[in-house]
Image (spheres, rainbow, N blue to C red):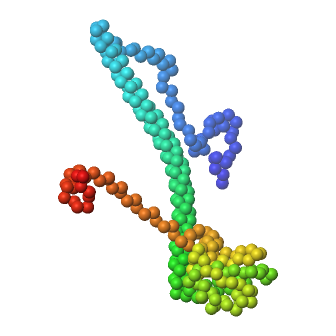
């Protein structure tokens, strides 16, 4: 059985010219309201300006100008404040960078100066320690010479042995108090070299001078000490220079005593004035 919708349309039927409602979707029915043209829209009429006097108009205009000026000033202040703040922050950053660079340079200079001062202090301390050690060695050597004066014989032997073997007429100059010590301690060597021991007050104790026709050997204690201290870099003399005596105040010349008359008439030692 076939429905009426499955049947082919017949020519001239209404179904061939219209679409059924159930087959259409999304449409609305249009109904004509009126076939007359719409009425023209009237232009908006401006509100009538209230009537004011010239004085009131000037007052209002001046107030508007003052308000505009105040607004402009306020806006200018805001812009100036913002620009000033930006410039101030930029200047602050530049100052901080420059201050950091300057501080770094100052700290570098200070550290270099401290290092230089430390080096100078080390040199000064080293020099002071060397001088103190040299003074201590000198004191110990003086004590040794005082407690063992016979050591001068060893000094004389070394000085004679240092003289050339072909030297003749050797003379060994020693301090008078060391003459007997040298004769006792170095007598055999002196006899083998035909050396004579002579006393000389100019030679300090503990040293000697050997002379011959071929040369002279200075073995004085001052000379040997000077050579030793020269190697140490502390030229400390063996004998400290004597301190200058304080100048005595010059006494003022005594005033001449007043002359007194002396009665010589009664002195029997003097000749009488009478004949």
Looking at the image, is 259 positioned above or below residue 14?
below
Q: Residue at x 45, y 17 (%)?
A: 41
Quarter where residue 234 is shown: bottom right
**Outermost residue to the front:** 275
**Outermost residue to the right:** 166
Residue 232 visible in the current orientation: no
Q: Position of residue 45 (x, y in %)?
A: 39, 14
Looking at the image, is 63 positioned above or below residue 95?
above
Along the viewing direction, whichever of 205 and 23 lies nearer the viewer? 205
Quarter where residue 64 is shown: top left
Residue 176 visible in the current orientation: yes
Does 30 sit left or right of 259 as displayed? Answer: right
Q: Residue at x 66, y 83 (%)?
A: 197
Does 196 sit left or right of 241 as displayed? Answer: right
Along the viewing direction, whichever of 50 and 185 lies nearer the viewer? 185
Along the viewing direction, whichever of 168 and 122 lies nearer the viewer? 168
Quarter where residue 212 is shown: bottom right
Looking at the image, is 153 positioned above or below residue 101?
below
Does 170 sit left or right of 137 as displayed? Answer: right
Q: Residue at x 56, y 63 (%)?
A: 119
Q: Position of residue 222 (x, y in %)?
A: 60, 74
Q: Position of residue 225 (x, y in %)?
A: 60, 74
Q: Position of residue 160 (x, y in %)?
A: 71, 83
């Amino acid at each position: 059985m076939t429905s009426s919708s499955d049947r082919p349309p017949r020519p001239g039927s209404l179904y061939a010219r219209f679409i059924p409602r159930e087959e259409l979707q999304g449409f609305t029915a249009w109904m004509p309201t009126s076939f007359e043209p719409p009425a023209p829209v009237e232009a908006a009429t401006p509100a009538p300006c209230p009537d004011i006097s010239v004085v009131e108009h000037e007052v209002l205009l001046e107030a508007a100008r003052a308000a505009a000026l105040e607004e402009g000033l306020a806006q200018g202040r805001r812009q100036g404040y913002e620009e000033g703040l930006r410039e101030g922050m930029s200047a602050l950053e530049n100052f901080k960078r420059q201050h950091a660079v300057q501080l770094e340079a100052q700290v570098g200079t200070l550290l270099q100066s401290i290092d230089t001062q430390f080096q100078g202090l080390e040199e000064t301390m080293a020099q002071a320690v060397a001088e103190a050690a040299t003074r201590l060695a000198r004191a110990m050597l003086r004590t040794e010479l005082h407690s063992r004066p016979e050591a001068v014989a060893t000094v004389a032997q070394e000085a004679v042995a240092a003289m050339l073997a072909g030297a003749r007429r050797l003379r060994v100059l020693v301090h008078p108090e060391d003459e007997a010590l040298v004769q006792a301690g170095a007598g055999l060597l002196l006899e083998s070299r035909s050396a004579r021991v002579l006393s000389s007050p100019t030679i300090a104790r503990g040293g000697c001078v050997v002379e011959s026709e071929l040369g002279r050997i200075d073995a004085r204690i001052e000379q040997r000490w000077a050579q030793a201290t020269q190697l140490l870099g502390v030229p400390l003399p063996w004998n400290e220079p004597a301190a200058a005596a304080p100048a005595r105040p010059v006494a003022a010349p005594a005033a001449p005593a007043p002359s007194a008359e002396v009665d010589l008439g009664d002195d029997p030692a003097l000749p009488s004035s009478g004949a």
